[in-house]
Image (cartoon, rainbow, N blue to C red):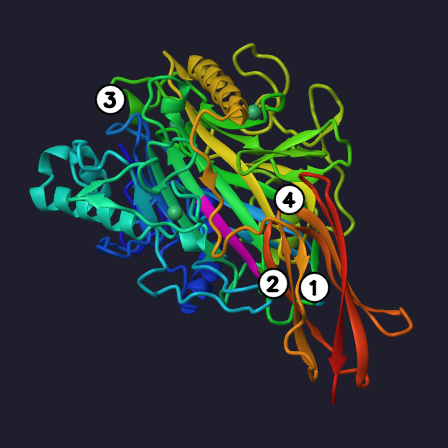
Amino acid sequence: MPRVIPAGGPPMKISLFNITLSILLVVVYTFRLSGEGDHSVKEQPVKHTPSLGSPTETVLNANTVSSWYSSDGIQEQNIATGNSGLTFPRQTATSMFSAGLLWGGLFMDGLMPPIRVNGTSYNSGIQRGAIQGIRTGIAEDPDAPDVRIWRVRRDYNTADLTLDAAEVHNVPPEDVTPEQIQFVLDQYITDWLEWPAHKGAPFYDSDVDGIYSPEMNGSDPVLYPEADEPGLANADQIIWYVANDLTAQPWTNVQSGIEIQTTIWGYDRTDGLGKTILKRFRLIYKGTATTSPDGRIEDMYVGQWADADVGSASNDFAACDSARGLGYEYNAVPVDADYSTFGLSPPAIGNDIIQGPVVMTGNPADTAIFDFRKVSSATNLKASSFLKLEPVSFAEEPPFSSDGGVQWYQILRGLPPTPQGPPDPPPIVNPVTGQPTLFWLSGDPVAMTGWRDGLWDGPGDKRYIISSGPFDMAIGDTQETISATILGLGSNNLSSVTVLKANDDFVQEWFNSLVGWSFPTSIKAVQEEVPNQFSLAQNYPNPFNPVTTISYDIPTRSQVLVRVYNLLGEELATLVNGAQDAGHRTVNWSAASFPSGIYFYRIQAQSIVTGEAFTATGKMSLVR
Ligand SMILES: [Ca+2]
Ligand SMILES: [Ca+2]
Ligand SMILES: [Ca+2]
Ligand SMILES: [Ca+2]
C-alpha cells in the first residue's frame, strides 16, 4: 500500500532517514517562515485544493504515466497528499517519491560565496514567477493570479476526462463527479486562452508574428496551422511554468538571479514514449540589481535529483548506465508488495539527460541541438556523473540549505559529499575495477557484472543525481537541457531494467531524429519580434548624466562584446562579454566616475549560428 503520512509527523521510512528528516525540519521551517514555496516538504504535507484560474500544481497524464508537478520546481510529488506523486501504470502503485533539478557553479558577480547551488529536492530554493528584466532583481509576485502553472492538451473537448479528473482531484475514478470533470475542462480552456507565451511558454505560431493569439470555435480550440496553438514537438499534453531564485531563502542565501522555465510534456503512444515524461529546463541568467554587468557563472553543472521509491521505499537499488546517460532505480527483489497488490511486477524508473547543455567547440564540424534547432560549432554535453545518495552511507544527502552548498557542488561534479572541501575530495574508486570514477554503480544488474548496488549497502531507500557539465554563462545567457523520466515494466524486477533500457534507447533515438523536423516549429516566444539583422542604436538618453542605455539587435545567438572607450581609444568598461540569444538587447553604462566629455561605445558580435560578424560604434556625451 502507499505510504501514509500521519498528520504532523514524519513518514515511516527507515529509522536513520527519520533522524535525517528531523534535522531537515529545522531547515524546512526556516523556508516556511519566508512565506514562499510553502508546500514543498513531504513530511509536512499541506492540504491543497486547486483553485480554478491559478493552480500552482498539476498532473501530466497523457499516457500510461500520471505524475504531479509543482510551479516551485518540485517534480513527481503529490503536493496534496504529501506522498509519492508518480503513478505507473496509471491507477496502480507509485514509483517516484519526489524529484527536482539542481544547478551549481561559481558565480562571479561580486557577491560571496561564489560557490552557489540552488534548485529543488524535498524542498525548493526557488519560487514561482519570472524575473522582470536583466539585472533588475525584480520578480513577479508569486501570489499574483497569473503566476501559476499551465496545462493544455489539444483534444480536451473530445477526450474522456474522467480519469484525468480523478487524478487531479485525488479521488477514485468511480467517485468522480460531473462538477470535477467540468472543473478540469474549464481549466484546460482557461489555460489554452491564457497560455503564457509572453513569459516564454512554447507555441506554434501560425502567422509567425511572435505573438500568441488563440482562437476558439465555441469551446473547441482552433488548431495549428489555422491558428496559434500551445505546444512543443507535437506533444499530446504540455505543462509550463517559470520560477526564480529571488526568494528570501535560496539554498545558498544569496540571490543570483536565475530564472528557470520548465516545459513538461508527454505522448499518448504505446511505444517507449508512452512510458515517458519529457522535461525541458531553461536556465536564464538574469542577475540581480547588484550583479555587475560582466557577471558570469563558471563551471556550472545541472543535475536531475530523484528519490525514486519503486512501490515500497525500503527495498530498492540504484544504478547507472553511463553509456546511455541513464540513472535509474529498480526493486532489489523480484516482488514489491505495493505492486503485487495490483498483480504487477515492480517497474524500473530512470532519468536520461537526452539533450545536455550546449557548449561552443569552435569546430565547424560539430553540431548541437538547442530549441530543437541545429547549432554549428557546438556540442551538447553528455551526462558527466552519477551518484547514489543514501542516509545509511557516507553519501548521505547534505542539508538542502546554505550549509550544504559546497557539498552539493561536489555532488554535482561527481565527487562524494564528504569530506567537505576545499580541497575537493578525490573521486570514489570503483570497487570492481579499482579505478576512480564519476559514475557510481555503473555495473549491469541483469548481467550481474560490474559495480552494483548492494555491495556497500543493502536494499533501501535510494536517491540519486545524474548531472551534466561544466558550462559557463554570462548575464543574459540562456542554457537548456532536456531530461526524460522513463519507466519499464517487465515480468520481474530485473526484466523491468531490460525493458527500461529498451525504452530509453527508443526515446533517445526518437529525440535524435527530431532534428529532421517532423513537427511544427515551436517559435521561441519573445516579447518582441526577433530582429532580422545586427544593429546598434543611439544610446538613450544622450546627452546623459550619469547613466545611459545602449541598445542593439542580434538576429541569431551570438558572441557579443560591448565596450566603452574614451577619445584616446582607451578602454574604460566592458559591458557585455559572452553568448546571447537573438533579440533586442540593452545594457546600461554608469559614468559616475568619469568627467564630462565624449565617449564611444562599440559592439563586436559574431553569430554562433551563421558565423556572420558585426562591428559598430556609437558616440555619446556625458554632461555633468
Ligand atoms: Ca501569432
Ligand atoms: Ca520497492
Ligand atoms: Ca541517453
Ligand atoms: Ca528512494
Kindly identify the amino acid type of the residue bearing the numbered disc 4: Tyr
- Label 1: which residue? 109
Q: Is residue 470 left or right of residue 311?
A: right
| Count of numbered labels shown in the rendering | 4
Crowdedness of circle 3 by 10 Å Cα count: few (<14), some, many (20+)?
few
Kindly identify the amino acid type of the residue bearing the numbered disc 1: Asp
Spatial separation of the CA atoms under disc 4 and disc 2: 18 Å
- Which tag, 4 or 3, sits closer to the chain's start? 4
- Spot occupied by residue 153 in the image (x, y as percentages of width and height): 29, 37
Q: Is residue 373 left or right of residue 602?
A: left
Instruction: Give the vertical position of 556 relative to 510 (above or below).
Output: below
Kindly identify the amino acid type of the residue bearing the numbered disc 3: Phe
Spatial separation of the CA atoms under disc 2 and disc 1: 8 Å
- Which tag, 4 or 2, sits closer to the chain's start? 2
Q: Callout 2: helix, strand or loop?
A: loop
Kindly identify the amino acid type of the residue bearing the numbered disc 2: Gly
- Label 3: which residue? 342
User: Which numbered mark, 3 or 1, is in the foreground of this view?
Assistant: 1
Task: Find the magenta span and give its range.
Answer: 257-262
Quarter of the displayed picture in which ligand 2 can be seen: top left
Report the front residue among 388 and 233. 233
- Label 4: which residue? 301
Label placed on residue 287 = 2
- Spot occupied by residue 387 in the image (x, y as percentages of width and height): 60, 35
Spatial separation of the CA atoms under disc 4 and disc 3: 40 Å
- Spot occupied by residue 392 in the image (x, y as percentages of width and height): 54, 38
Instruction: Give the vertical position of 249 relative to 265 (above or below).
Output: below
Q: Is residue 172 left or right of residue 313?
A: left
Q: Is residue 523 magenta?
A: no
Kindly indicate whether the residue at mark 3 contacts the one at mark 2 (C-beta within 8 angstroms): no
Kindly indicate whether the residue at mark 1 contacts the one at mark 3 (C-beta within 8 angstroms): no
Instruction: Give the vertical position of 17 relative to 145 (above or below).
Output: above
